Image: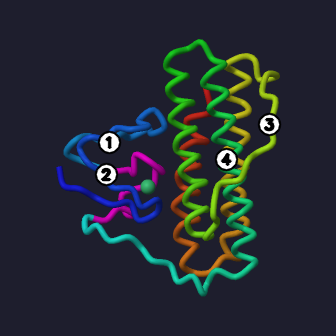
Amino acid sequence: MKKMRCLICGMIINEKNYDRNSSSFIDKNTDNKIIRCPFCGVTEEYLSDDESYIDLDKRDLDDKTRKILDIGMKLEMFNSEFYAEASKQTNNMELKKMFQDLSNVEMMHARVHKNFGGFEQLPILRKMDYTKHNTDELLFIEANKREKHAVEFYERYYNQVPEAYKNIFRALADVEKEHITITQGD
Ligand SMILES: [Zn+2]
């Protein structure tokens, strides 16, 4: 398998990791066809077979953009934390894996904002209480609400970030749209 680099999260995709987080995807990678980044979930148009990583011009990074990326970083971290809790709460083994995979992908989105925003570290979140979502159905409802909220975030700020960041917002919004679909339940 040819190594590839994700231009959004920067991870190298290889034969050992191509099937990570597979429960967060509708169409899955195989060992001879990579269609998604297994770490941040973006589609293949953002994957490159030369291994160089995009180098964003940090001069584009004004205070307003930094503020937007800070909101995005926190939103993704809260969603990642919710999914980690959801994975603990459900007794359904398939759902446990799906929620854990979603938690991993959202955490990678937070890291993408951290990197491109030039933040030193991920913030510490205040502890939330998730116990009211105490059935699988309620977990799905909450997950779906959060994914819709994430897509709204990327769409709302798309026109307010510099050109180079629009690509990233579009790529991540598409991932969250797929998450809306998989958290719709039956
Ligand atoms: Zn990626």
| Mark 1: amino acid | Asn
For the residue with label 2, is its CB less than 8 Å from the closest atom of ligand 1? yes
Query: Which residue corresponds to mark 2?
Result: 13
- Helix, strand or loop status at disc 1: loop
Return the residue at label 4.
77
- Whether the residue carrying mark 3 lies under 8 Å from ligand 1 is answered with no
Say left or right for 17 vs 118. left
Q: Whole-Å distance between the Cαs marked 4 and 1? A: 22 Å
Residue 106 in the image: state x and y as whole percent: 58, 46
C-alpha separation, residue under disc 2 versus residue under disc 4: 23 Å
Q: Residue furthest front?
A: 120
Task: Residue 93: give x, y in percent of width and height.
Answer: 51, 16
Report if residue 138 lies within the magenta region: no
User: In the rendered view of the protein, which quadrant contains the C terminus?
Assistant: top right
Check the image and report above or below for 8 versus 126.
below
Mark 3–mark 1 distance (CA, rounded to whole Å): 31 Å
Tags 2 and 1 touching, CB below 8 Å? yes
Tell me the crowding category of disc 3: few under 14, some 14 to 19, or many 20 or more residues within 10 angstroms, Cα based: few
